[in-house]
Image (cartoon, grey):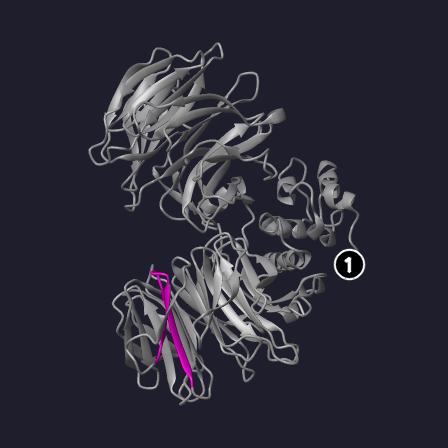
Amino acid sequence: MAVPHPYLSRHLARHAALGGSLDDDHVPPGLLPWVAGDSVRGLLGLPHAHRADQSWLAAWAAVEPYLQDADFASRCSSLHLAYTALQYPGIPHARLPQEAAACTGSRLRVLWSQWAPPSNVLATLTRRSRSLAMAEGPDGAVLLAVGNESGGIELIDAATGAAVGDRIPAHEGAVRCLSFVPHPTGGGVLVSGSTDGTVRIWDTNRGTLVNHMRLRGHTWTSDVTGYRSDAGSLTVAAVNGEGTLTLWREDSREHHLTDISPHPLDRAAFTLTLTTDPDGRRLLVSAGRTLGVWNIADHQLLHEYPLGAPVRSLTSTTVPGCVATGHSDGSITVWDTASGARASFPGEGEPVIALAALRIDGLDLLAAAGSGSPIELWDIGAKQWAGRLTGHTDTVTALGTTAAAGDAPQLASTAQDNTIRLWDTHATRRALEGTDTAPAAVAAAITTGSDAPPHLAVSYATAQVQVWDTSRGTATATFSTAPEHPVSALAWAPGDQGQRLLLWAAADHSIRSWDLVRSTTASTPLVGHSERVRALASTVACDGQRLAISGGDDFTARLWDLDSGQPLQQWRHPFRVRTVAAASDGIGRDWFASGSADGIVRLWDARDQEPGHVLYCQQGVINAIAINLGPSLLPSFLASGGDDGTVRLWDLFTHAPLGEQLQGHTDAVEAIATWTTSGDDVRPYVASSAQDGTLRIWEAATSRCVLQLATGSRVRTLSAHLSDDSTGSVILTMAGEAGVAVLELDLEDLSPS
């Protein structure tokens, strides 16, 4: 493909948006991998930018945040995957139209997918975020201020997702809290509080420090807020970890308002917010042992209400005079500042660490985040749970709302998956209607061999397992498991008469099998684990014996004889076993391996109870391993992936590291697959997926990443096998939060000579 003129790459999409012609005709798909100007995702959100034909643009917007430094082949391949998955879910490759079957520059074919990449990622971050606030930047631009664990503040354009200025080195400790205080004439200041015990005030137009205060005592800043008097002068309110509530006025005078009494169950839980009562009176609300309501005008305490559980989050609501508290036991309470508790929502035991309020279609809603990735929606008026927003792949750390003048409100969120996401009214409506997203895939396994069509087994978060004929795009079998206990691991194994058996981890910690030919549960379950089974793998040993290895939360890996259904070995670990692998070279050597939370991979012999060797990987928790026995440029090796975001290769005979660490992921590696190409050019490859929303293909002999795919969400399982034809391509199966996809990769000419 001809390289487009730099002016087109940088400016065409923006000109099309401003001219009301941002569509696939005016900004063709072939240009998108070259776009270097404003983000397409941001341009699609501009007024008058919505057009009928934006399918390719929407696909690019879904993967764009993850491809800043990717090469051309990676950009084209990611665009191809996103477009096909979004437009033709469940359609096998043979029935795809030409533009989806093949895409210029792409190195993959989508054989079958039920994959829905997230489309609401505004930006990706390089550091873990802790706090979030809406702010106003130059020329009235709506910004999102994000405080991170390393003491920095980043300003992100809420329309385009672009960084505004350089990262502000704001504090020496984590930025726990942020609050924007607007100025009546436009603009305003950003107030930040940190674990270093300081409060600082920033000019968001210039990114410069306006003022700096250190709290009393030697403790952290718990929360901050701010407001202006009728004359426009600034007051900042801050509470520290000991409950000291202090006010600073713009004339630099400090006023010690009170010492908030600590809650007996958590003596360091203090929060602040502002609200306005129905009469227009501005109120400062504090939470510790009690909920205190203060009149801003004269700093008098108006009301005080006891709190049953410690407060972890506090926000004003869209109901005048009402605030909401999120508690350490997971409950939420809505308070009328004049009369006390108004409604209470039960929790599930996990602290509510973030709250935000928004009004959509006449409903007053609360968005709440706990220790997981979903965002729960509560209807204040109806006093009930209303829906759930899913998409983040790690713990949500902060919530906020953002809206330009005249626009509908959007919920903003940031999480430990290092993304900022915007949830517009359409996404919120879908959540309220229960049609937010397709169910996530927990695990997947695909059959190999040319004797039958490939069958893909998928375990969904809805506690259902489906088996798909991916060549036809049809489900051949479906069975349900125990409610609220989705199958955590799947593996195909050969049956005793050549048929295929699907091994799956049941809710009672047993391992059960399902016969593909008979479409029935087969044989007696494998019983032994006392906690959840996290991983499964199977192989045919050199002596023809059918074996399976399992690993679980009971600190054991177990070896099973599938012919007799009996356990052969119980291999104990000091921590949970998170991943297992099995392989046989067919001529005399069987390999079994397990990786656990202690950062160690153990190699086992089927005849021994003690590991044959221990690999000290130094990668944090080991989340994934895979074995490669193919003849290639490297000896047989094991690949390990850990929490530090690296992949390492280990010689299975010398147990020494092979080559350099495979570095490129910015978050924990969660799944790994390996394969070796056939034919004249025999090369070993490794595929790895991480919580950073990317999947990388590595040429193992050179430690070089040859392809990067933007998945946009967590991929929990990967598997790879060579295509049955003579092309030398590889079939890669991935499953995770966005669903499942089966891809055929063509890596020819991507590897160095």
Rendered position, 339 above or below 735: above
Helix, strand or loop under label 1: loop
**Magenta highlight: main SS:** strand
Amino acid identity at mark 1: Met
Say which of 233 and 45 sits in front.
Answer: 233
Residue 311 visible in the current orientation:
yes
| Residue at (28% x, 46% y) in the render | 349
Give residue 344's position: percent from left, percent from top.
29, 36
Q: Quadrant of residue 246?
A: top left
Question: Magenta segment, which residues?
Answer: 589-605
Question: Is 601 within the magenta?
Answer: yes
Give residue 489's position: percent from left, percent from top.
39, 68
Residue 6 located left or right of residue 655? right
Residue 175 located left or right of residue 342? right
Q: Quadrant of residue 485?
A: bottom left
Q: Quadrant of the C terminus?
A: bottom right
Give residue 379's position: percent from left, percent from top.
39, 38
| Residue at (53% x, 79% y) in the render | 630
Question: Is 127 within the magenta?
Answer: no
Rendered position, 387 above or below 589: above
Residue 718 visible in the current orientation:
no
Q: Which residue is mark 1?
A: 1
Residue 492 located left or right of residue 87? left
| Residue at (50% x, 60% y) in the render | 689
